[in-house]
């Protein structure tokens, strides 16, 4: 994900009377007439909601298990099983990410529920890894390097696919494979430690090649540049404004662009004044004083106090970093907002308001899912013989090979750990699969899962450590991949994406032009293409503390059905691309909603977290080893980067006795 994988809805209600999402109307925007108001919302039929697209929510029969939970029917209990093409996890559509069946057991533990100890399997391992995301897979890799390739390892994963947030979205509805990303976007290679560089080399990953073969630029490289789309529901009219970037006013005629914004006259006047300002509002302060001040004031308050922006003007910036940071602008300090590319640097003596520069990342065509696939192949070669970094994006994985009894490394999907306890000789681990409890033993255990769940899995941990683990409330994240018949409508408009203030997802962009890992989808190809809708769900405005904001956003996300997400993306596509010939009833081929209620790791924000002495920050206390159990995951580094997840796995393995 750039930086670390939205936009505000009305706070009064989660859904409108038809079950659709509500916008947050601009108070002084042009109001539709009574006649116009009747046309603001199209019916489900007009939006193509009844179309025969591929969507499978995988909501399973609650009566399947004696535990009374809705649990997945696929997967294995103690041995592998075949996977049909229809059940191939990367091609599943509907509600994905934290899909139905992946979190119910953990929520039962959270709510004080208990499970039977389970049947003891005749399985003893050197290492059990809880979580088969990139950190868990890296832990298995480093364990083999430290303890030998003959070490017996079991990875337990609660989802129906490996990779954690590095989720692969694979589409075949058009007759050709089209890839998209469902979570972790990319590699911030300039931040790699020597440890991470070494792992990349072992996996054959050439970050320079991944950079060279990337034309994709997050919707900023269309003929008419970046774009801003105002929607009818929120602003009174559907309006696309091209060659418009809110974050960079240096090379744009901002007055002319702002005149096109469907906002009230006062808000437009304020925005013009703001973008025209060239001053240093902190003149007289030392660099240290200026930085301290910028870290102490919220980004919106900074613009209120020093640029005179009112609420209607400010709401344009509310959701700019919901995808990158996972929070509204009000949760960011001025320092954080400006560092992220939000406008305002010209108030500090700079010549330009800001710069939404191209993020110089290395990317696979399915996000970092290809990295997870390379890790799995390294551990379990029979899953895809002949696979390497040059062809991994094309490889068809044999999921029945993940959990074979004769393999040194096994990966068991649909398996939620419910307990991990130290014993005199190692660790006993209990988990749920297909509604049944099982128990296994191991010499060591690495917890590579969300830290907030670990106190429920390891109740004997020291109180201080459990408190620190619970401190790390993760930020929700949402990526919705939509396969459409062609890019011709966007091509006609001269855009490759747009920001959408007022909608559920703040960004939408064409996902092509990443010709790496054996995959090819040229940017000039105007055929079937995934569109990625990216962001998060804004919390209600009356929720103050940032952790409560995360929780409120998570609650809203989990309350939505697939149909609610589908209605949202169809509404946006119809309003934005309909005038250019896009037929929302005909041209949508598939929709995959990658919802991550527990998304970005809880990194520390200027306005919400104190400065702790070295070694005493919550993530540092949380990641302390506990006998034969150690902690990995990006949560242990309090930073939602892939390289952090890998570094924490390396540390966790080397802390094992």
Image: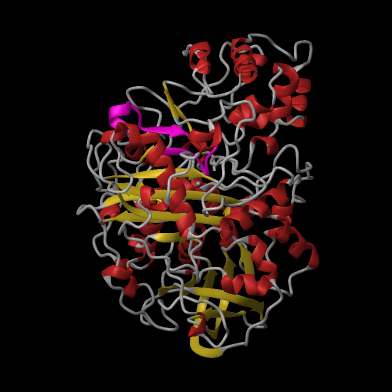
Q: Is residue 376 left or right of residue 525?
A: right
* Front-lying residue, 268 or 80: 268
Q: Which residues are magenta?
A: 490-508
Which residue is depicted at the point 51% across and 69% down?
102
Colouring style: secondary structure
Residue 403, picture quadrant: bottom left
Which residue is depicted at the point 22% across and 37% down?
525
Q: Is residue 566 left or right of residue 267?
A: left
Q: x, y percentage for residue 543?
A: 74, 47
Q: Is residue 86 magenta?
A: no
Which residue is depicted at the point 30% across and 42% down?
583
* Front-lying residue, 565 or 506: 565
Please, is residue 564 above or below residue 356 in the view?
below
Please, is residue 307 above or below residue 519 in the view?
above
* Front-lying residue, 362 or 38: 38
Q: x, y percentage for residue 70?
A: 52, 76
**Which residue extends farthest front?**
35
Please count the marks in the image.
Answer: 0
């Amino acid at each position: 994900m750039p930086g670390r994988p939205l936009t505000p809805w009305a706070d009064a209600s989660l859904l409108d009377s038809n079950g659709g999402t509500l916008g947050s109307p601009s108070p002084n925007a042009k109001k539709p007439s009574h006649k116009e108001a009747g046309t603001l919302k199209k019916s489900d039929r007009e939006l193509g909601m009844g179309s025969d697209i591929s969507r499978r929510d995988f909501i399973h029969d609650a009566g399947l298990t004696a535990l009374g939970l809705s649990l997945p029917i696929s997967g294995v209990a103690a041995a592998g099983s075949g996977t049909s093409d229809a059940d191939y996890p990367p091609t599943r559509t509907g509600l994905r990410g934290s899909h139905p069946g992946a979190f119910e057991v953990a929520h039962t533990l959270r709510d004080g529920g208990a499970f039977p100890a389970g049947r003891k399997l005749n399985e003893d391992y050197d290492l059990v890894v809880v979580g088969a995301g990139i950190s868990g897979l890296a832990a298995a890799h480093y364990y083999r390097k430290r303890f030998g390739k003959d070490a017996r390892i079991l990875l337990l994963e609660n989802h129906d696919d490996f990779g954690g947030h590095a989720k692969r979205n694979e589409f075949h509805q058009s007759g050709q494979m089209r890839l998209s990303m469902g979570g972790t976007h990319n590699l911030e290679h300039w931040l790699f430690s020597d440890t991470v560089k070494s792992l990349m080399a072992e996996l054959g990953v050439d970050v320079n090649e991944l950079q060279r073969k990337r034309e994709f630029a997050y919707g900023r490289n269309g003929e008419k540049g970046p774009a801003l789309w105002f929607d009818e529901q929120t602003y009174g009219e559907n309006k696309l404004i091209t060659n418009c970037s809110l974050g960079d006013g240096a090379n744009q005629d901002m007055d002319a662009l702002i005149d096109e914004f469907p906002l009230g006259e006062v808000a437009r006047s304020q925005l013009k004044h703001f973008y025209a300002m060239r001053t240093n509002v902190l003149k007289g302060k030392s660099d240290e004083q200026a930085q301290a001040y910028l870290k102490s004031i919220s980004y919106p308050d900074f613009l209120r106090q020093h640029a005179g922006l009112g609420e209607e003007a400010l709401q344009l910036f509310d959701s700019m970093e919901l995808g990158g940071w996972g929070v509204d602008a009000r949760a960011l300090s001025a320092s954080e907002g400006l560092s992220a590319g939000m406008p305002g640097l010209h108030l500090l003596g700079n010549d330009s308001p800001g710069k939404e520069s191209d993020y110089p990342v290395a990317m696979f065509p399915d996000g970092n899912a290809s990295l997870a696939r390379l890790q799995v192949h390294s551990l379990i070669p029979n899953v895809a013989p002949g696979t390497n970094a040059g062809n991994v994006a094309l490889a068809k994985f044999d999921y029945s090979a993940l959990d074979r009894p004769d393999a040194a490394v096994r990966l068991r999907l649909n398996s939620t750990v419910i307990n991990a306890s130290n014993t005199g000789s190692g660790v006993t681990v209990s988990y749920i699969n297909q509604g049944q409890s099982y128990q296994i033993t191991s010499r060591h255990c690495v917890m590579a899962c969300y830290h907030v769940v670990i106190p429920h899995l390891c109740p004997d941990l020291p109180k201080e450590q459990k408190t620190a683990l619970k401190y790390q409330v993760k930020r929700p994240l949402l990526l919705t991949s939509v396969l459409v018949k062609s890019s011709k409508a966007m091509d006609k408009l001269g855009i490759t994406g747009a920001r959408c203030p007022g909608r559920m997802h703040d960004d939408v962009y064409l996902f092509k032009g990443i010709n790496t890992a054996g995959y090819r989808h040229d940017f000039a190809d105007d055929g079937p293409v995934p569109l990625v809708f990216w962001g998060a769900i804004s919390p209600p405005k009356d929720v103050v503390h940032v952790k409560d904001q995360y929780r409120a956003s998570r609650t809203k996300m989990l309350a939505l059905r697939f149909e609610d997400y589908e209605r949202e993306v169809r509404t946006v596509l119809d309003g934005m691309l309909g005038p250019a010939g896009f037929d929302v009833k005909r041209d949508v081929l598939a929709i995959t909603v990658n919802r991550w209620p527990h998304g970005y790791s809880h990194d520390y924000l200027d306005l919400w977290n104190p400065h702790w002495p070295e070694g005493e920050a919550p993530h540092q206390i949380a990641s302390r080893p506990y006998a034969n159990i150690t902690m990995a995951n990006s949560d242990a580094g309090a930073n939602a980067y892939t390289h952090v997840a890998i570094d924490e796995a390396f540390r966790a393995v080397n802390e094992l006795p």
